[in-house]
Image (cartoon, rainbow, N blue to C red):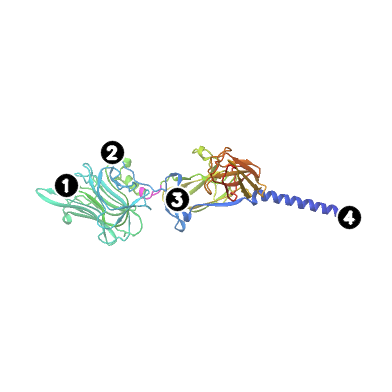
């Protein structure tokens, strides 16, 4: 009885051992031989071209990599726009077409504060010179009414005497020629606005009105500047980053009430922007008053001044942005396991990632195949196909103050095992044909073989054979005669195995052989 139990136990152990071996074989066949692949988008090598880019731009991300972030706002031309230089085109021009660029020495530059590009001024005494058309503020003699001059700057050094804006002309009163000037200049790390003989009837300080920023200008940091004059109140105000720096009432009383000294410009002349400034400038614009029916857009009542302040604090498009990669080719049956990202997601911002796969991307649409939401670092299930595509949506915070950014996306996926190449390929030439033979591939994933041929080494683009163009699917055999070849021509051959899983999964080529068909004599 004990002997019987011992033998039974041996039999059971043997059976378990066999089952375990079979399980290991199945597991190895399904997973163990699958090759792990890692695709890196962004990072050190940068980003490839995208099939879709909506409201996104490039910035500087983690470890100095180029990052993707929400595009920054850019000013738009509206009814109150007198001049707009947004530097977004291939050439520098006034987006409103009210001014003509006479001379330009600025260079377009990325890493702007608004939109995609800004202007780089190198402090060589040129900058941008523009001539205003009739009807513009600086192209017309007389009272310009309400106006605003607005821009972003990032100085490199903020040196004394650097000029941001300059207009010079003259006005004749009772046969007396009066010199006029409007100028914004750096003085002791501050910006001083000087209006000389601009406000009609104002005689204090020899007709000069000055506004000087209270805050010091910080080099290498973007700041928003706006100078405004309200013809209804006489208020001349200078703001930086939405904060009032200096104000003056151009009234007889010097206060909010009283007769207003209205601006009057003389002979039209060119304006120059950054004639001696080293640094970056963006979205320079000049504005005038709007029609009363567009009061909600005007910049000059209290509500609108607050709106202008909010515009400064809204550098990112709150609607967010989206990008989609080009379809990425793998092999049939590839399985995407996960994505990992190198990103920066400030509070209240968000990045959502998506993936889709398919066998033929030529029939893909915006919604087919369906996008599947994925979470970085988490396992992705049921995502397999010959092609896959990654998308992401980036959302700034509600105030448009901060944008998330992604510097790198790492995609881990598995490709099914490739059949091993057949060995010992031989070729024997005959009259208009070549006989090929080889040894079967050693692994059991092979279902059959393709025969490749051509007339140049390593280029298997043959079309001569009556059996078909290269490659020829010959099935699960280890010899094949290729007919219909030209006598005297040399042909090169290779054989590759295709997988039981999918005949489109083709292994590596065998060694190359060659032969020259000939007619027996």
Q: Is residue 315 magenta?
A: yes
Q: Residue at x 81, y 51 (%)?
A: 12
- Alpha carbon of mark 1 to alpha carbon of mark 3: how far? 48 Å
Q: Nearer the viewer, residue 94 or 329?
A: 329
Report helix, strand or loop for mark 2. helix
The region drawn magenta spans 311-316
Q: Overall secondary structure of the magenta stretch?
A: loop
In the picture of the structure, the residue carrying the numbered disc 3 is 68
Q: Earlier in the sequence, mark 3 or mark 2?
A: 3
Left or right: where 196 falls relative to 68: left
In the picture of the structure, the residue carrying the numbered disc 1 is 267
In the picture of the structure, the residue carrying the numbered disc 2 is 292
Q: Is disc 4 in contact with disc 1, using a CB cutoff of under 8 Å?
A: no
Q: Nearer the viewer, mark 3 or mark 2?
A: 3
Q: Nearer the viewer, mark 3 or mark 4?
A: 4
- Alpha carbon of mark 3 to alpha carbon of mark 2: how far? 41 Å
């Amino acid at each position: 009885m004990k002997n019987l139990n011992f033998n039974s136990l041996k039999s059971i152990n043997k059976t378990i051992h066999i089952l375990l071996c079979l399980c290991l074989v199945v597991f190895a066949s399904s997973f163990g031989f699958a090759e792990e692949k890692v695709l890196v988008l962004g990072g050190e090598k940068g980003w490839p071209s995208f099939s879709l880019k909506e409201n996104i731009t490039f910035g500087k991300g983690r470890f100095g990599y180029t990052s993707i972030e929400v595009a920054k706002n850019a000013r738009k031309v509206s009814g109150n726009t007198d001049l707009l230089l947004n530097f977004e085109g291939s050439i520098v021009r006034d987006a409103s077409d009210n001014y003509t660029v006479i001379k330009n020495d600025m260079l377009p530059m990325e890493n702007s504060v608004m939109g995609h590009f800004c202007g780089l001024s190198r402090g060589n005494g040129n900058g941008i010179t523009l001539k205003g058309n009739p009807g513009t503020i600086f192209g017309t003699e007389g009272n310009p009414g309400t106006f605003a001059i607005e821009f972003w700057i990032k100085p490199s050094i903020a040196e004394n005497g650097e000029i941001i804006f300059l207009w010079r002309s003259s006005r004749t009163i009772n046969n007396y020629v009066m010199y006029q000037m409007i100028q914004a200049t750096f003085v002791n790390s501050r910006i001083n606005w000087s209006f000389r003989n601009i406000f009609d009837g104002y005689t204090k300080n020899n007709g000069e009105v000055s506004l000087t920023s209270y805050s010091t200008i910080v080099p290498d940091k973007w700041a928003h500047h706006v100078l405004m004059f309200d013809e209804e109140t006489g208020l001349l105000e200078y703001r930086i980053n939405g904060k009032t720096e200096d104000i003056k009432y151009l009234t007889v009383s010097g206060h909010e009430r009283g007769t207003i000294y209205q601006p009057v410009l003389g002979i039209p002349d060119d304006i120059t922007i950054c004639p001696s400034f080293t640094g970056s400038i963006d979205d320079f614009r000049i504005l005038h008053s709007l029609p009363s029916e567009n009061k909600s857009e005007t910049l000059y009542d209290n509500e609108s001044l607050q709106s202008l302040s909010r515009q400064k604090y809204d550098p990112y498009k709150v609607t967010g942005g989206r990008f989609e990669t080009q379809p990425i080719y793998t092999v049939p049956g590839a399985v995407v396991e996960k994505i990992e990202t190198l990103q920066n997601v400030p509070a209240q911002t968000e990045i959502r990632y998506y993936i889709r796969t398919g066998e033929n991307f030529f029939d893909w649409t915006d919604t087919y195949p369906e996008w599947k939401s994925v979470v970085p670092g988490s396992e992705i299930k049921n995502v397999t196909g010959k092609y896959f595509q990654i998308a992401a949506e980036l959302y700034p915070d509600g105030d448009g103050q901060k944008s998330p950014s992604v510097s790198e996306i790492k995609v881990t996926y598995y490709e099914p095992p490739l059949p091993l190449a057949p060995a010992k390929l031989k070729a024997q030439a005959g009259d208009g044909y070549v006989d090929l033979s080889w040894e079967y591939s050693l692994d059991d994933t092979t279902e059959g073989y393709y025969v490749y041929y051509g007339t140049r080494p390593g280029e298997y683009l043959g079309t001569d054979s009556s059996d078909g163009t290269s490659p020829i699917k010959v099935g699960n055999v280890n010899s094949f005669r290729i007919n219909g070849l030209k006598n005297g021509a040399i042909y090169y051959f290779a054989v590759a195995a295709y997988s039981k899983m999918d005949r489109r999964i083709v292994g590596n080529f065998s060694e190359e052989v060659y032969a020259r068909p000939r007619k027996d004599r």
